[in-house]
Image (cartoon, helix red, strand yellow):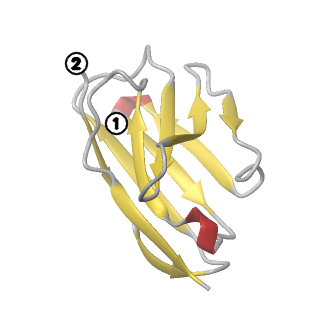
């Protein structure tokens, strides 16, 4: 199993930016990597994915504001978040799929 450690969260004003990092315990070369988020009382939702060739997919609510990058040499995936909105407030996680164990996540709080 590959394990992940997320970091980079924090408190930011609406319109601000954050860059999250996801460090893997092993090679991620062969994996499609996803960023997910969860707010209290809601199911964890997919934010976006980056495929092995670098192609990305995003949910509509973050399209044009969030960018997922991967550095296979560092076994790390990033989530660049710009133009943040209060509704982006959540704990953010990365993973290869929803069946793999989850890391602790990183809290992102966007104030209005």
Q: Looking at the image, which residue sits at the far top?
A: 30
Q: Quadrant of residue 73?
A: top left
Q: Residue at x 40, y 45 (%)?
A: 93
Q: Which residue is mark 1?
A: 74
Residue 72 percent coordinates (x, y): 42, 29
Secondary structure category for the residue under label 1? helix
Residue 29 percent coordinates (x, y): 42, 19
Q: Which residue is mark 2?
A: 1
Q: Is residue 111 above or below residue 36?
A: below
Q: Is residue 22 visible?
A: yes
Label pair 2/1, CB-CB below 8 angstroms = no
Residue 30 percent coordinates (x, y): 43, 13
Please name whichever residue, 50 or 27, is drawn nearer the observer in this view of the structure.
50
Q: Is residue 53 above or below residue 47?
A: above
Q: Looking at the image, which residue sits at the far front?
A: 41
Q: Is residue 8 visible?
A: no
* Dot 2 or dot 1, earlier in sequence: 2
Q: Is 102 on the left or on the right of 18, as rendered?
A: left
Q: Is 70 on the left or on the right of 57, as rendered?
A: left
Q: Residue at x 41, y 26 (%)?
A: 98
Q: Nearer the viewer, mark 2 or mark 1?
A: 2
Quick one: label 1, few (<14), some, or many (20+) residues within 10 Å?
few
**Quadrant occupied by the C terminus:** bottom right
Quick one: label 2, few (<14), some, or many (20+) residues within 10 Å?
few
Q: Is residue 53 above or below residue 44?
A: above
Please name whichever residue, 111 or 94, is drawn nearer the observer in this view of the structure.
111
Q: Residue at x 65, y 71 (%)?
A: 85
């Amino acid at each position: 199993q590959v394990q992940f450690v997320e970091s980079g969260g924090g408190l930011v004003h609406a319109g601000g930016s954050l860059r999250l990092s996801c460090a893997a315990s092993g090679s991620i070369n062969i994996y499609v990597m996803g960023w997910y988020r969860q707010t209290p009382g809601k199911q964890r939702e997919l934010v976006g994915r980056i495929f092995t060739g670098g192609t990305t997919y995003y949910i509509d609510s973050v399209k044009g504001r969030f960018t997922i990058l991967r550095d296979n040499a560092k076994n790390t995936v990033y989530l660049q978040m710009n133009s943040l909105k209060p509704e982006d407030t959540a704990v953010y996680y990365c993973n290869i799929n929803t069946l793999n164990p989850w890391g602790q996540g990183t809290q992102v709080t966007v104030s209005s």
